[in-house]
């Protein structure tokens, strides 16, 4: 590609992300280096490309003194297991969000953190959580508007299914009865 072309492939050599307009240092395939080049990004989506990521350098009116970089990409970490029509957001560490065919959103990560004033889930059919430990830390009341089934309830370290105590001044209580209710 000649040096008078308005478009050239480039490689990211350095990023400067701490400004409103992210700047990068790039190496053009012909060995030409460009410093303090603006990285154009789509509204609402931003990323800090790793050193070695590729992109396209644009030179307006063929002027090599004024460049902009678009579409930074990094084939080293790009997911290769997607089907036609699927979309992924991913990192070099393997965290990713994939919009799968069949209206499925799949998230892979080590920690999934949501920060919100309110967190609402509306599931028309069911909610399923499979985990080792589960903790609910609520400063207010935790409630259910429907019945809850569980193999065992433990209150202050005491399993309620095998808990007996003296009933007022009478005999010991028996095991809880299925189908009982207040």
Image (cartoon, rainbow, N blue to C red):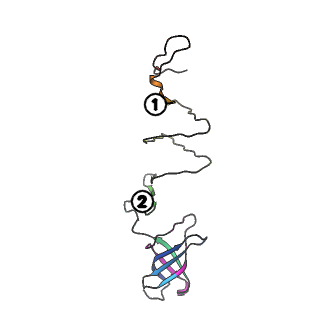
In the displayed structure, 4 sits above or below 137; it is: below
Q: Which mark is residue 150?
A: 1
Q: Looking at the image, which residue is at 52% across and 21% down?
A: 181
Q: Residue at point 61% right, 39% down?
A: 139
Residue 142 coordinates in the image, percent (x, y): 58, 35
> Residue 136: x percent and y percent?
53, 39
Quadrant housing residue 133: top left
Magenta span: 35-62
Element assignment for label 2: loop
| Picture layout, residue 116 above or below residue 19 | above
User: How far apart, in angstroms, are the residues tagged by discs 1 and 2?
Assistant: 35 Å
Upstream in the sequence, badge 1 or badge 2? 2
Q: Nearer the viewer, residue 139 or 38?
A: 139
**Image disc number at residue 101:** none
Return the residue nearer the eye: 106 or 52.
52
SS label for mark 1: loop
Instruction: Establish if 30 lies above or below 76.
Output: below
Return the residue nearer the eye: 18 or 181: 18
Left or right: residue 119 versus residue 30 is right
| Quadrant of the frame with the C terminus | top right
Quadrant of image for the N terminus: bottom left
In the image, farthest residue toward the top: 170
Q: Residues within 10 Å of mark 1 (few under 14, many from 20)?
A: few
Is residue 55 part of the magenta span, yes or no? yes
Residue 55 percent location from the top left of the image = 46, 75
Callout 1–callout 2 Cβ contact below 8 Å: no
Q: Residue at x 45, y 19 (%)?
A: 175
Residue found at x 55% / y 51%: 114
Position in image of residue 135 (x %, y %): 50, 40
What residue is shown with label 2?
94
| Mark 2 Cα-neighbour bin, 10 Å: few <14, some 14–19, many ≥20 | few
């Amino acid at each position: 590609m000649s040096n008078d072309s308005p478009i050239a492939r480039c490689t990211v050599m350095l990023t400067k992300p701490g400004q409103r307009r992210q700047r990068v240092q790039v190496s053009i395939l012909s060995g030409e280096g460009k410093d303090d080049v603006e990285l154009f990004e789509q509204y609402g989506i931003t990323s800090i490309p790793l050193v070695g990521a590729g992109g396209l350098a644009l030179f307006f009116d063929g002027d090599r003194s004024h460049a902009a970089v678009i579409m930074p990409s990094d084939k080293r970490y790009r997911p290769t297991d997607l089907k036609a029509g699927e979309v992924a957001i991913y990192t070099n560490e393997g965290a990713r969000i994939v919009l799968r065919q069949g209206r499925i959103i799949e998230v892979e990560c080590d920690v999934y953190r949501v920060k919100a004033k309110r967190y609402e889930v509306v599931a028309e059919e069911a909610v399923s959580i499979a985990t080792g430990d589960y903790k609910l830390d609520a400063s207010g009341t935790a409630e259910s508007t429907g019945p809850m089934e569980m193999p065992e309830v433990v209150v202050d370290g005491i399993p309620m299914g095998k808990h007996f105590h003296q009933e007022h001044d009478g005999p010991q209580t028996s095991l809880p009865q299925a189908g009982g209710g207040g």
